[in-house]
Image (cartoon, coloured by chain):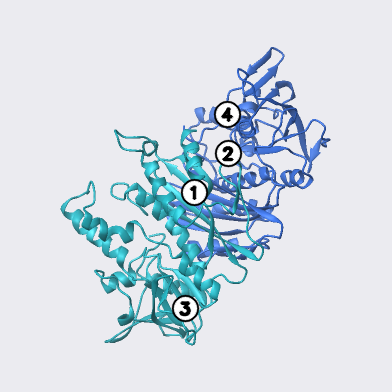
Chain colours: A blue, B cyan
């Protein structure tokens, strides 16, 4: 089948040291180094829910699919070994329209560019016709045994850190919503809007920062900010059996974003991690700023799981981010 | 989220020796033994295409999703280490209707029963609301390095074998189609129809047979018959750079199936493998019959890739099985 052969040829690019056998057999074969364990994650993206065919560029849809999976590896401190993609597409997305290349080709442009940047070969997957576009990305990574960054290791007294800035993806989306109210569907983004939307359209998984933290065993817990700080920090507290408080004034809010966007906006794909108060951390890891934003507390009856500290005092910070079934 | 917690609790059952960390973190962590490599496969199932919500029992949909993945591991001779499931569902499939349990619960009944039978823990996945039901199953297996059964190893002179019988799934489906012509949608299958449909509804992946072949290094090539003999044998010839001929009289046709169903019917999930003529194979592997059905030939210009030998002579055997994009 033409599409499968084309993908196979394109996926052959890139560093494939861990891939002993790629697309074309019943399974791919992967090798890992002695003393490593495997990290595996899957992320399902569905048209109309995780992306919009009417305004997300196809390249962005491909990029974001892979970024979700790579970000999960980053959150564990794992190095990428291989990606797998199960893709269900309506037939028209596989066809050229006029001079334009097929949607699926541009989808792979975006996906494979990010894969190349992180030396992650596309080693297999599945392809089927589907009434709606769906893409399930699978990432296999490797991490030295016992060194993976888990959600469950945060302890009272630990400080809470985030990489980069927060709210950029949500701020871009809000600006787009405002523009769409005037012009229902932009055929092409203006340069200004494109720049504002870039953090949403092309988020950067923090692989280098995750590897840095895992190698030095400095973080007690970690996860990636995919659903939004208020939701993801609640997940970390749940898995660690602790509570947390966040200093509003300490948040590294993206320039142009609101504090609400920084607290609840999803898809920033920064890392959130904890480390004992005594741990000396640099101000930047792999050239990306690291900011302490709060601390881990014991869980107590009557205390909110996560609290926000402002100049008006403490208030509960309820999860208001992405819900997977809403 | 209630559904996720429920899956997490149910998936905790079963042997999980290779799973160091299961559902609940950014990734699952898996361990493999020294000297093993990993086999990874993904299979996407879409409502209306791979299964029908109006007549496939939910338990069968869950079983068949996992069976597709396990069968790919069987075809490589790999032992299952863990399964991952990305599931997109319309909301009504997650809800009880009257006294009936939710569709998704019955889906997991079927999937987890087969998982238990093959000691394959469900170690993670993703869950999202979706306008149509989609399920992507990911299987991770392990195989001693260099022992995996590939599609590419068949050589001229090798004999071609299949496990079990052929055409059972297609025969059941045809009978169902006849009944549906009279009664559009059966609310519940009769005992007779249920028995006839069992090979289609609950196919058995040939894990034990694949492991047996890989451990003894007896097969030169192998794949599983998911798309139908005519299509899958063409794939094997393509990957091995050879041609093949099949003896019609030798085919182990399922009792009640036609030779056409045995040649082109998909979803039997038997193994097709090749071995040198000099290799002595038993008549049964792990209690399942093994039948020689033809031989591998050199590829020559003007010769069909796959030919069928009958008492009327040789004729080309064109692939007429499942097409992933049709």
Label 1: which secondary element? strand
Chain name for mark 3: B
User: Are circles 1 and 2 on residues that touch, CB within 8 Å?
Assistant: no
Compared to residue B43, the image places residue A253 above or below, namely above
- Residue at the disc numbered 4: A174
- The disc numbered 2 marks a residue on which chain? A
Position in image of residue A19 (x %, y %): 63, 63
Q: Do the residues labelled 1 and 3 touch (CB within 8 Å)?
A: no
Residue on which disc 3 sits: B274
Separation of disc 1 and disc 3 at Cα? 32 Å
Name the residue that disc number 1 marks.
Answer: B85
Left or right of B301 in this view: B258: left
Q: Mark 1 lies on which chain?
A: B
Asked whether the beta carbons under mark 1 and mark 4 sit within 8 Å of each other, the answer is no
Instruction: Report the side of A285 relative to B71 (left or right).
Output: right
**Residue bearing the label numbered 2:** A189
Using the rendered image, report if marks 1 and 3 lie on a common chain. Answer: yes
Instruction: Return the chain for callout 4.
Output: A
């Amino acid at each position: 089948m033409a599409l499968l052969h084309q993908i196979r040829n394109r996926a052959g690019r890139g560093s494939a040291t861990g891939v002993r056998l790629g697309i074309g057999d019943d399974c791919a074969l992967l090798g890992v180094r002695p003393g490593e364990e495997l990290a595996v994650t899957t992320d399902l993206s569905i048209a109309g829910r995780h992306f919009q065919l009417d305004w997300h560029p196809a390249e962005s849809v491909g990029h974001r699919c892979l970024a979700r999976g790579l970000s999960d590896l980053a959150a564990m401190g794992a190095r990428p070994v291989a990606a797998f993609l199960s893709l269900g597409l309506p037939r028209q997305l596989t066809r050229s329209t006029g001079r334009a290349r097929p949607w699926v080709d541009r989808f792979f442009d975006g996906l494979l560019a990010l894969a190349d940047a992180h030396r992650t070969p596309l080693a297999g997957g599945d392809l089927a016709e589907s009434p709606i576009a769906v893409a399930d990305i699978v990432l296999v990574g490797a991490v030295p045994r016992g060194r993976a960054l888990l959600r469950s290791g945060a302890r009272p007294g630990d400080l809470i850190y985030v990489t980069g800035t927060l709210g950029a993806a949500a701020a871009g989306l809000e600006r787009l919503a405002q523009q769409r109210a005037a012009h229902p569907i932009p055929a092409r983004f203006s340069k200004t809007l494109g720049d504002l939307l870039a953090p949403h359209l092309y988020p950067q998984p923090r692989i280098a920062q995750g590897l840095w933290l895992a190698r030095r065993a400095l973080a007690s817990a970690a996860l990636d900010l995919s659903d939004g700080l208020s939701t993801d920090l609640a997940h970390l507290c749940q898995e660690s059996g602790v509570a947390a408080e966040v200093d509003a004034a300490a948040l590294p809010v993206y320039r142009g974003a609101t504090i609400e966007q920084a607290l609840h906006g999803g898809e920033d794909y920064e890392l959130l991690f904890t480390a004992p108060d005594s741990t000396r951390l640099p101000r930047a890891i792999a050239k990306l700023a690291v900011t302490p934003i709060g601390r881990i507390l014991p869980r107590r009856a009557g205390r909110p799981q996560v609290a926000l500290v402002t100049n008006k005092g403490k208030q509960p910070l309820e999860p208001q981010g992405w819900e997977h079934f809403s």
